[in-house]
Image: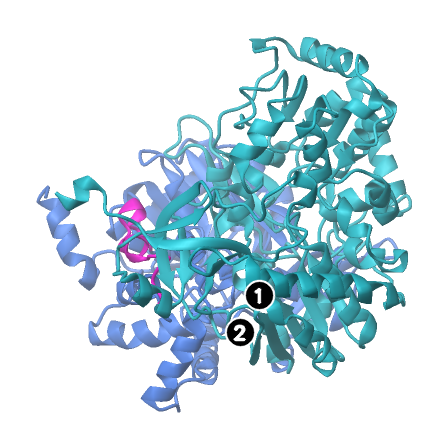
Amino acid sequence: MKSKYYLAWATDDEIRKRGANGGFVTATLVSALETGFIDLAVVIEKKSVYEGIPILTSDPEVVKDSSGSLHGVPLNLAKYVLESAPDKRIGLPVKPCDARGIIELAKRQQINLNNVYLIGLNCGGTLHPLQMRAMAAECFGLDPDSVLREEITDGKLFLVHEAEGTEKEAGMKIDELERQGRGRRDACKACDTKIPVMADLACGNWGVPQGEQKTFVEVLTEKGAAILDNALSNGAIEIENASEQGIELRKKIEASMQKLAARWNAELDVLKDLSPSERFAFYKAELQRCIHCGACKAVCPVCACEADAKCLEQHDETDSYAISMYNLLRLLHLMDSCIHCGRCEDVCPVDIPLTLIQRRFSERMQRHLDYTPGMEVTQTPPLNETKLRWRAEGE
Amino acid sequence: MRTLTSICPGCSIGCGLYLLESEGGERRHGLKVAHRTVAPMNEGKLCKFGMQLPAYYDKEALHNSVDGKEVNHEEAIEAARERLSSMNPEEIAFIALPGTITNEELVSFTSLASEFGCENLSFGFERFFRDIPEEAFYVLEHGLPFSDVEAASKIILFFVDPFVHYPLLARRILKAKRNGARIIEVSFTKNERGLADETIVVAPHEFESLREKKELFEDSLIIGELTPYTNPHLVSLMLWLQASTSSRLFLLKPFLNVTGALLISGGGKGAEKRKDLFEIFDRIDRGKIKALYLLETDPVSVLLGGEEVKKTLSKLDVLIEQNVFRTPLSEIATITLGSEPFYKKKGTIVNIEGRVLDLGGESANGLAILERMGKGRSYEDVHEEVKKRLGLGSSEPSEFEIAVTRTERKFGVAFLVEFIDSFLSLLKMGNDEERGEEGYSLWYKTNPFFWAGVRDKQFVEISPAAMRTLGLFSGDEIELVQGDLKERLGFKISDVPDDLIVSEDKLAIQPSDGHWAELHRRELLTSVALRRAKRSSTAEE
């Protein structure tokens, strides 16, 4: 279907106040649950500005409580969708990497995408929570526990905090923080997928006239149109057409962020000027630290082998190889499917720079195969094609 | 699905994590581990043990019973109180290796022991306090914040391989290295994974050479380990190195709440007066102790020579086991008291850094069992007592603070020199006279799996020379022999000395012969014979 652009907002005062950009996403999900349009929602239960837990809920009140941005809670929700029963209809807000993971799992027949409504959120990146606490203290001069909420607008990180009984706001340019070695996770810095065009709806504040508490919404699929219509018919939201000026502004912001991502991608690639033997020495030194905990596999949003995983099967503790078969198989296996979300690196107990290594191995292969994982539902993952054919043939 | 904020009980780091508890009607059931990025101890990282935590919790629950007959909670508690009351204080012992035990339970447990007038109370580390100056107790009691590790300019890994022993410490050492620290390992063997800039390989009989290398330890952070099997002389040697140089000593411990246990039970001064774990076993063996209360401690699975331990404990008239899961002792226990799993507990622990961590659960059943037998206090009252004993004041500590801090003190070393000398001469003698049949020594490289016994593949590391000597091929098995004890298992080729065998698993092989009290006081390494295992008849066919 052809994309449609709107500005939208919640009709409920409370939701409008608590949710980001006029509460459109919260109101749409709440309405979908209240009307039985979906059975469950995956949302992040907020524990603090720095901590949130993904939960699967059928309770609209829980969805209302989860509203608001959580840039300091880096998660990928793809595996959480797997927790739901395959016949349940699920709605969830997704960053581009969440959506890409879900789509890759759907292609590997782990998720029934017909039952999943992806409400995409434009994403400039996430921050590590402990780094964010340190930034609050060391860059903003705040008690980290006094921070009530955060927001990223116009390239600035704003921390709303409590001081002497009132709410105060402090802001700093993310670029400036990143020049100090702070700021977003490396995977987010290098990510060039800023608008979730693979989701059913793409929402955010890029293209919204300054000062207005509204969400810019792009309707991308029939499912997206249906969940929006549901919220409209239920009186949960109001919409108006987006202006041409707004659409252009949104494109410009996206292009500028993609340019920044390309710069970061080059800057973070510490291997690009090394000789092949130096690169091999780097891989060996980094990967020999692996303690085979399996955490990278457990959180990977595109790993779908489960108990059949060859990487686990081939790993033998009595091997004396510097780079184990576990890592080699994972590198090979993720050639076509790695979405570079950085979750593997987030959880690696020995700090192997897996985002960089996976990116170096898979990016060229994905270009060669003309395949970008998690973007097109209809595009078959090249290295998984035979397995899918066998499965379809019942072998 | 319920999300529970929890702590890994694998070692004394206390990694923060989530446990996802699935309910009926969903696709997957049971427990699942998820990372908790905001946890300051581990920053969202977990080792293999943490990732496999659901398997650790997947065991048969322990029910309440008296003399093998299932009873209700109150009846079991009443029977335990009665049986203990009928004994003389010197005939009773209390043991808790604090792996899954909260500070609150430890307060109740120590109170209970004193109510029965019992001095046979062990948390597994008592004997280490006896042979060292009181001014040095703080080193054994307290750990250090990981920020101190990251800020160190020179780190000496003293017979510790952090990737195996404490993986979540390894990344802090890597950070220190990135910050410019020099990493030196002092060990029987070069560790894998290239962490150290320099390796000082020490043969067991050449320990005295370390005293001659004092300059190596200047301005360093020495990281060592303290387990129930650590030779007290080795601890003295580490303390001597700290006292004789400008170094600091950081002793890692295997059980989650050892720091809490030591501090709550009166610290080193308290520990010095009490009976040691192995002394208690010795007294049970000799029939002097007739009743034992084990709090969430399974010595058969945790300690080396488990069968020997079981044989000794079967001599007891009364064995009370308070635990969550059934253990090899549950069959012979006189009274069993079922408690709640660690991840459901309400309470606190102190990690090796000195952080007082809230467990996040809601149940205080384990504490209630102890309190019903003892003073009858509420959780809140006991928690206040914990704060008092830890010196925390009135406010609740946050996991982002190091609440229990360590103050460095000067201590003398003159007394230690004689003690260490006796140790060194014993080592020399050991080298000449106590080698195994084929001249091999076994070194246990401990890790969370070692203590919890949940590994599924058993193997030892041997040198390429040992492989050639025995004519081994890939896939063969070897046999370790110590007297009548034998272990048949796989092997891995490593860069270890030719006469050394390294095991990350608990084997039937014991550190030493003789009485419990003498256990492992003389040897650092265990003498064994190494043989190629005969192929089974099935394989030959």
In the image, which disc is placed on residue B195?
A: 2
Look at 15% across and 45% down and name the residue there: B540
Residue type at mark 2 is: Leu
Percent from the top left, x then y, of residue B199? 56, 77
Magenta region: which residues? Answer: A303-320
Are the residues tagged 2 and 1 within 8 Å (C-beta)? yes
Q: Position of residue A326 (x, y in %)?
A: 33, 61
Q: Which mark is residue B170?
A: 1
Across the whole image, how many numbered discs are drawn on residues? Answer: 2
Q: Is B86 left or right of B226, judged from the image as shown?
A: right
Vertical side of B387 occupied by B148: above or below: below
Locate residue A186, reporting x and y percent.
50, 72
* Residue B463 position by quadrant: bottom left
Relative vertical location of residue A10 with respect to residue B116 in this rendering, above or below: below
Q: Amino acid at mark 1?
A: Ala
Rendered hue of chain A is: blue
> Percent x, y for residue A84?
39, 37
Neighbor class of circle 1 (other Cα within 10 Å; few <14, some 14-19, many 20+) is: many
Work out which quarter of the rendered image holds the C terminus of chain B and state it: top left
Q: Picture quarter containing residue B153?
A: bottom right
Question: Is residue B510 something one can see in this rendering?
Answer: yes
The dot on residue B127 is none
Front-most of residues B199 and B23:
B199
Colour of the chain lettered B = cyan
On whether disc 2 and disc 1 are found on a single subunit, the reply is: yes
Residue A294 seen from this side = no
Asked whether residue A305 is drawn in magenta, I would say: yes
> Which of B534 and A122 lies nearest the eye of the viewer?
B534
Q: Secondary structure at mark 2?
A: loop
